[in-house]
Image (cartoon, grey):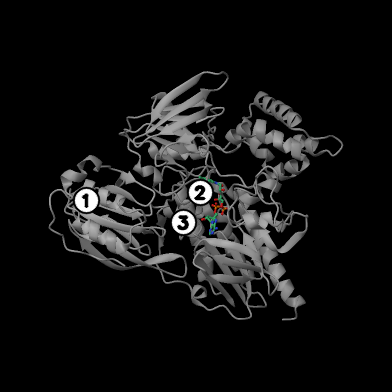
Amino acid sequence: MTITAPPCPTGPLRGLRWLIKELDARADTVDAATAQRLLADANLTEQDVAPYVERRLDAYARRCVVHRESYELLVLTWGPGQGSAAHDHAGSLCGLKVVQGSLTEQLYAPGPDGQVRPTTATRFAAGQIIIDPGAVVHALTNTGTPGQLLVTVHLYSPPLPAIRRYAIASSPAAPLFLREASPKARVIAILGGGFTGTMTLANLLRLGRDAPAPLHFVMIDRQPAVGEGVAYRTGDARHLLNVPAGKMSAWPDRPDDFLAFARACDPSVGPGDFLPRRLFGQYVRKTLLDLAGAPDGRVSVELIRDEATSLAPASSAPGWSVTTAAGRELHADLAVVTLGHRPPNDELAHRFKGPRNRFVADPWSTLVLSQIGPDEPVLLLGSGLTAVDAILTLDRADRTAPLTVVSRRGLVPLPHTREPPATDDVSRLVAQWLDPSMPLTVRRLVRTLREAVASAAARGVDWRPVVDGLRPSIAKLWRRLDPAERARFLRHVRPFWEVHRHRMAPEVADRIGRLRDSKVLEVAAGTLLSSVADADGVDVTLRCRGGSATRSLRVAWVVNCTGPGVHDRRSTHPILRPLLEAGTLSADALGLGLCTDDKGRALTSGGETHPDLLVAGTLRKSTLWESTAVPELREQARVAAELALETVLGNRRAQGD
Ligand SMILES: Cc1cc2nc3c(=O)[nH]c(=O)nc-3n(C[C@H](O)[C@H](O)[C@H](O)COP(=O)(O)OP(=O)(O)OC[C@H]3O[C@@H](n4cnc5c(N)ncnc54)[C@H](O)[C@@H]3O)c2cc1C
């Protein structure tokens, strides 16, 4: 619902401060009527908001005025023509008032294919108000006269958990999204619609088209834009794929598929190019929608845009019962869990005092870093690819304040080479490691791998093909390590393995190098001892690596870049916790993911197999270790779809349907 109100003549003292005082006087979240009244009564002038107005050339600017538990207030500055993507506020109330300039709000209607289509557009002038109680999908644009700035004050209550961006459709939804499921349909539910979930659905559509029975596929994701997941949701064009385009096909049997898609956008793209991650998200979505648009037999598909809150064995029939936050309950004959990455663990929980509004717990949350100004010093915890993303977002031509990265060893991902490196044959090395007559230890692995790298260097071969050559055998090697050796690997070798294995695109490495050279960026080895926050910043104490020396610094923000959170009974996806506690599922002792058999069927704590509960994606790191990147996950999506169809159609035959 969008409500507009005429400008309200008010006294000169009813400015930003008055608004904050009024909001602070309310203990609870603000409702639509109160937001409307307060914003109408507030006399927000250009002078009032001037300290928060910031003109950016690359995107509109967001500056936080106050952030409380029940609400936050921001000032947004939009340059001429600048606008937002189609988005909603994930259930938070949004009230905005135009202070200066002219704004156009484009509304969208969500469709059954996960995309939105434009409906009405309205122009707003200074003094006018928009209220969204939490359900609107809209995009805002500065449509003032050439050169004119647009300045808006935004109230979110509760504070925005994240903005959810939508994909805009260019054609009507395919019939299979509109069709009612046949009462006799076998139902396959996919929990999580990132790359793995979306490609599982795409494989189901490809393989299930000629199935002898009606099929209904349901995919549930709290994020509206299918196919993006955590990795490809970024709107920042500087966030590049860390795998070259030629190796990023979503299909195991069509290696050039992504390259062809990218070349349709830009014919000059080569297989060795590292492209923006958001382009890959568009590709995955198009892959699904193209398949959905083909003639489709007796298949129906439902995309549910909601949080899946419970998964439990169905009580009245075989299969699984799934519930969502909005109260939807559905029965699935088979479920595929593709919930992927957890947000980073809260590293500061025990070492942080004071208000937490200057601590960014999840840097993957859309737009969360855009509120950090170029004059604000930032401490980033962790120095892996998540930190690299955050640095790129915080890096601006007008940045004057330093970015300090701290991690235990201060290791930063190594770069890819510009030319694809020659391959190296590591089969003899792998055969030695897999030889059942010799125990495999981490010490032996590291020693012989170092020797192999040295011998490759002597032949003029880089270390990268040696590391990459191991990739197809990693799951077998991981299985050969006993639990104590796996723990040793995580403790001592993992950081070194990660920086060699998950590398940066060369362009990204160049940028990081330049930032380090210019002293804007510092990477320190050490640990965080304490952090004490006040309203304006955080006092941090670090212990430097290799001694007892400490270092203190004052920063405006601390950003948690420690990467995906672990999976154990306490801290896995909330929906999996009760299943782990009941022993219906089991997680590995190292917190890497769920225990499964070779094909991805989930195991109980007693080691029994669930034939109708499959796991694919990063949650399989526990059994495969190498279960992170597209080249592995596309194969898992194919296998999960094949197995799912075989299981539900086999059950149907067994039940004589
Ligand atoms: C920042 C980053 C960059 C990366 N870059 C690359 C790259 O360049 N190349 C590469 O090959 N790999 C890359 N990866 C690896 C990445 O793991 C895979 O490529 C892939 O995106 C993983 O997809 P997924 O579907 O398994 O998991 P995710 O992307 O995590 O998707 C899981 C989905 O489940 C949803 N979800 C979770 N819980 C619930 C719930 N309870 N209810 C509803 N929905 C839920 C989430 O909203 C999410 O959309 C990157 C990873 C990250 C984190």
Q: Position of residue 115 (x, y in %)?
A: 43, 65
First in residue order: circle 2 vs circle 3: 2
- Label 2 SS: loop
Alpha-carbon distance for marks 3 and 1? 30 Å
Which disc is residue 653 wearing?
none
Q: Against 68, is 9 above or below?
A: below
State which tag comes first along the sequence, 2 or 1. Answer: 1
Quadrant of the rendered image containing residue 345: top right
Q: Is residue 192 left or right of residue 379?
A: right
Residue 206 shows up from this direction: no
Viewer-side residue, 287 vs 257 = 287
Residue 286 or 424: which is nearer the viewer?
A: 286
**Is residue 270 shown above or below 311?**
above
Q: Which residue is mark 2?
A: 231
Q: Residues within 10 Å of mark 2 (few under 14, many from 20)?
A: some
Q: How many marks?
A: 3
Numbered mark located on residue 282 in the image: 3
Percent of width and height locating residue 20: 27, 48
Q: Position of residue 16 (x, y in %)?
A: 22, 47
**Rendered position, 193 above or below 510:** below
Comparing labels 2 and 3, the label whose residue is closer to the camera: 2
Pick whichever of labels 3 and 1 is earlier in the sequence.
1
Q: Residue at x 78, y 58 (%)?
A: 608
Label 2, label 3: how many angstroms apart (C-alpha)? 12 Å
**Residue that carries the numbered disc 1 in the rendered image:** 150
